[in-house]
Image (tube, rainbow, N blue to C red):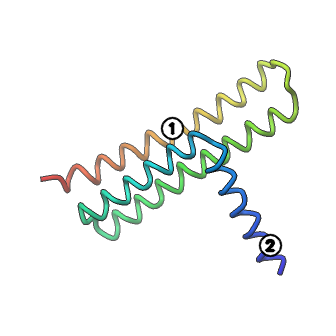
Amino acid sequence: MARLRSFLYAFAGLRLLLREEHNARIHATITVLVVVAGIVLRVSPVEWGVLVICIGMVLAAEAFNSAIERMANYLTTERDERIRDIKDLAAGAVLLCAIAAAVVGCVIFLQHIP
């Protein structure tokens, strides 16, 4: 029963991420477009695997970033350069993941476009 409960908490976190985080909704929309493109262009099973890893990486990075931002906001509402730097580093990590995923998407999809 405890295992099931932990999955329910995890799904609640995903709902919270998509409901309250604008950037997560943008990433989710791009995910839908990538899946549609993969179906239309008939990417290979290996390419699907790479795309799924990239999608998971970006969405997980966004979730970590959102958690870090919420924790920082919980700790203090005052302006603090250290908190700003922490938030900027987390946002930068999401950006790096998104750029890497976009490059992978280009490499995979461009070879399938006639």
Left or right placement of residue 88 versus residue 29 in this view: right
Left or right placement of residue 96 versus residue 1 in this view: left
Left or right placement of residue 33 versus residue 92 in this view: left
Residue 90, image x and y in percent?
Answer: 65, 36
* In the depicted structure, whether residue 26 falls above or below residue 3: above
Q: Amino acid at mark 2?
A: Arg
Q: Earlier in the sequence, mark 2 or mark 1?
A: 2
Numbered label attached to residue 46: none
Q: Residue at x 85, y 25 (%)?
A: 77
Left or right placement of residue 16 versus residue 41 in this view: right
Label 1: how many residues lie within 10 Å, few (<14), some (14-19) or many (20+)? Answer: few
Numbered label attached to residue 96: 1
Q: Identify the secondary structure beneath mark 1.
A: helix
Q: Identify the secondary structure beneath mark 2.
A: helix
Give the distance between the C-alpha atoms of the residues marked 2 and 1, in whole angstroms: 33 Å
Q: Amino acid at mark 1?
A: Leu
Q: Residue at x 43, y 47 (%)?
A: 101
Residue under circle 2? 5
Residue reaching furthest to the right: 75
